[in-house]
Image: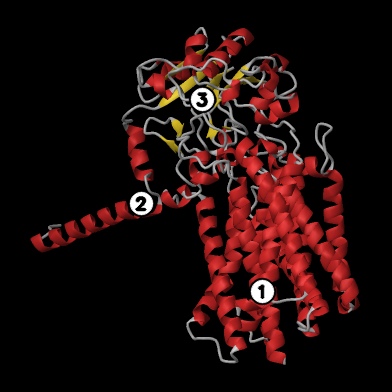
Amino acid sequence: MSIDRREFIRIAGLTTFFGLGGKAAFELLTPGQLEAKMAQEAPKGTRWAMVVDMTKLDADTAKKCVAACHRIHNVPDLNNPVNPKEKVDPEDKVRWEIKWIWADHFHNAFPGFEQPYQQKLDHLPFLLLCNHCENPPCVRVCPTKATFRREDGIVMMDMHRCIGCRYCMAGCPFGARSFNWQDPRPFVKEVFPDYPTREKGVVEKCTFCVERVEKGLMPACVLESKGALLFGDLNSPKSNVRQVLQQSYSIRRKPHLGTNPQVYYIV
Amino acid sequence: MLENAFTGSKRYYLLLAVLGGMIAVGFVVYLYQLSFGLGITGLGRDVSWGFYIAQLTYLVGVAASGVMVVLPYYLHNYKAFGRITILGEFLAVAAVTMCLLFVIVDLGRPDRMLNIIKYPTPNSVLFWDMIVLNTYLILNIVIGWVVLESERNQVAPPKWVKPLIYLSIPWAPSIHTVTAFLYSGLPGRGYWLTAVMAPRFLSSAFAAGPSILILLALLVRKFTKFDPGKEQIQTLAKIVTYAILINVFFFFCEVFTVFYSQIPDHMLHFKYLFVGLDGKGQLVPIMWFSIVGMTITALLLVRPENRANEKTLAILCGMVVLTTYLDKGLGLMTGGFVPNPLERVVEYWPTIPEALITMGVYGIGLLILTVLYKVAVSVKEEIKS
């Protein structure tokens, strides 16, 4: 079968038309999805992620990780006010506590995953923090873009733009966000000069230590973890996190909700 | 027309003074909240929305229900409602104003409120809620005022207001749908994650709103020379009956899905509300009162004699308002947050300062309602004489 010039141009034209139309339709109906698919084949840039190896983490180390994080981010300690008279009563403390990272039981960290014959697991100090989800509901619901996702996957807060509506707290399925129900400064005994303190009325959370990562340093909790916490670029096949995840089975919190958390737990 | 707001009986001024007092108290406590922070409320990291947002939710429904008098009049030419559309519209104005104020008092940084407009974010339902509520407010002020003014001048309303009226009809359910979407689209909150949320909101709104309207109509008849009319009240009562029956039906649809499927993420919230969880259950009696009371009220409303007698009707309407308020106000908000995403039970109860600020906002809403109703009723009395 031969094709004359005219026919060839007609087919070529149609193909181009549908080809372009197809792409345009994809763009219109599922913006970014096509790019995302292409990106999956050849990842570009960095995608930060964390691996928590529970086989290596003990309660003492977990405590140190929390303390290190909270110290360098001026997270208020309600038990330890600058003026000892301003102590917060325990009931208010439960409600007002600011937590960027904390240790919790398995059944609280992974509700629905627990089974009665794994009691050992429940006594491990599961370190919980913002999951820096690939598809973060907090970012979706924020009415001012005060919380947003960076290209490298870190979910950030602009505490100067936040209006304190707390929609992100309702949206987060991991309880990773804290609100300043009062002025936090009277509860920061030693102000760490390299990080701003906050005002009352705004939401805050873990930032994967973006300020350190940008300088090429590891997050504070990772440094304190004696190797139990790993941090790295998931897009790089040679990174420590990629290799560990390749070798060991890991779980993530509430994966069925489709937020695609980027903190992995080896149990 | 507004001059009517400044002349009135002693009782009118007394009412204004009482409302002024409520507002003043609320305002002072709000200043305290501004200086201390939202810690003066019972809220916390686990239950991060409470009494304020509950009022917002309930009152959006009251506002939306204005359409229940507007729609029959303008779309079905049901003449009887022509007399009372203004009452529905002005009730909507007062209710939406309160909604907006409740959002503001709930903000941690109200000074940055305009960031919602400065950085418009269409993927946030709150952004859309802001748009639909403000538009609905403006629509109702303009429509109500213009139609009332033409009524006073005994001329037909200007042509340009008709399209606005037609727009306001679908707009009413939209405000409550968007408000339901605030909750029903969140992945981690099993109590809210239900497609029947928006329909349930609408059914309870169309029961509660017209109930409030009936009660207001009875008050207007008692204290002024304007009678909103017997037929009008009876038709509203039928609307209330259908809506509350549908609302009860939706509730049991929800209960079936949750408990037959046995999915813990969804069941735990109902268990907390109706039997308690981890030994905590301060809302249990309130929830049972709400749902049992609502069901009985709905059944009693079915009997025509109970509706025809305005005394029993008033009691039943009061029950509709109360039971839907408990279900949608306290129950919906706290139930959604308890247990928290880590399946811990941290309970919530509003504090006194929180209640006083809430009272202040209600004071503002009732003041607006009183003044607007005074204007409307004066015009109606004027036409009659």
**Horizontal side, residue A4 vs residue A162: left or right:** left
**Horizontal side, residue B295 vs residue B121: left or right:** right
Q: Nearer the viewer, residue B117 or A17?
A: B117
Q: Position of residue B353 (x, y in %)?
A: 73, 43
B84 over B21 or under it: above or below: below
Between circles 2 and 3, the one closer to the viewer is: 3
Residue A70, quarter of picture: top right
Q: Earlier in the sequence, mark 2 or mark 3?
A: 2
Q: Position of residue B2 (x, y in %)?
A: 61, 76
B347 over B86 or under it: above or below: above
Q: Chain of mark 1?
A: B
Q: Nearer the viewer, residue A214 or A255?
A: A214
How packed mark 2 is, by other alpha carbons closer than 10 Å (few <14, some 14-19, many 20 or more), is some
Q: CA distance from mark 2 to mark 3?
A: 30 Å
Q: What amino acid is labelled 2 in the image?
A: Phe
Q: Residue at x 83, y 54 (%)?
A: B290
Q: CA distance from mark 3 to mark 1?
A: 64 Å
**Residue tagged 2:** A26
**Residue tagged 3:** A263
Q: Position of residue B81 (x, y in %)?
A: 69, 83
Q: Residue at x 76, y 71 (%)?
A: B12
A87 over B336 or under it: above or below: above
**Residue tagged 1:** B6
